[in-house]
Image (cartoon, rainbow, N blue to C red):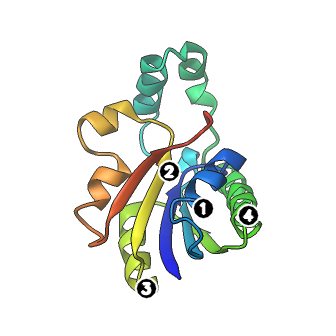
Amino acid sequence: MFTSVLMIEKALTSADVEFVTTLHGDEPVAFHVLLQPRGEQADRLLRAIDDVALGELDEAVREGGTPEGDEARSMGERALAVSLQALRGTGDTAEGRLVGDHPLDALRKLVEEVGADEVIVLTDPHYVEEFFHRDWASRARHKVGVPVLKLFSHSKA
């Protein structure tokens, strides 16, 4: 069985689930999901710039309304539950947890705990962070000791 740590920031869509569950053909996969709720991410300004870069001006204006704190955590718990159920629905195994302030430290620890074969980072595009190599995937490549695959989600958050 192949062991993948999947790092996400919102609920997986059916297209996302199909995408990650078919990466290894018919080989069964054990998914260990880490979800950092969007409201817990550091900088709204960077998210707004990403929205502008994508031509999503309405989204950039709405960044101020992004849930924070307990509301973001509650939404994150629901998104994680939906994602785990969808992954399990394919016949693969899946477990997961929310992460907070230090997602890359949690990622490194989980990779070591489960003996992961790979890390998959599945997020919306974050152009500013990617340009400066400050996105999760770029930073994880220097921390986890296993291959890191960066994929873009099939829907906008």
The answer to whether mark 4 and mark 3 are in CB contact below 8 A is no
Locate residue 146 relative to residue 42 in the image: left or right.
left
The answer to whether mark 2 and mark 1 are in CB contact below 8 A is no
Q: Quadrant of the C terminus?
A: top right
Amino acid bearing label 2: Leu
Disc 4 and disc 3: Cα gap in Å? Answer: 21 Å
Residue 143 x/y as whole percent: 26, 67
Q: Is residue 100 above or below residue 29?
A: above
- Dot 1 or dot 4: first in sequence order is 1
Q: Which mark is residue 38?
A: none
Q: Residue at x 55, y 42 (%)?
A: 153
Query: Which residue does the numbered mark 4 point to in the structure image?
Result: 81
Amino acid bearing label 4: Ala
- Dot 2 or dot 3: first in sequence order is 3
Q: Secondary structure at mark 4?
A: helix
Between tags 1 and 4, which lies in front?
1
The answer to whether mark 1 and mark 4 are in CB contact below 8 A is no
Q: Residue at x 37, y 52 (%)?
A: 136
Q: Is residue 101 or residue 23 the one in the foreground?
A: 23
Amino acid bearing label 3: Glu
Query: Which residue does the numbered mark 1 point to in the structure image?
Result: 21
- Dot 2 or dot 1: first in sequence order is 1
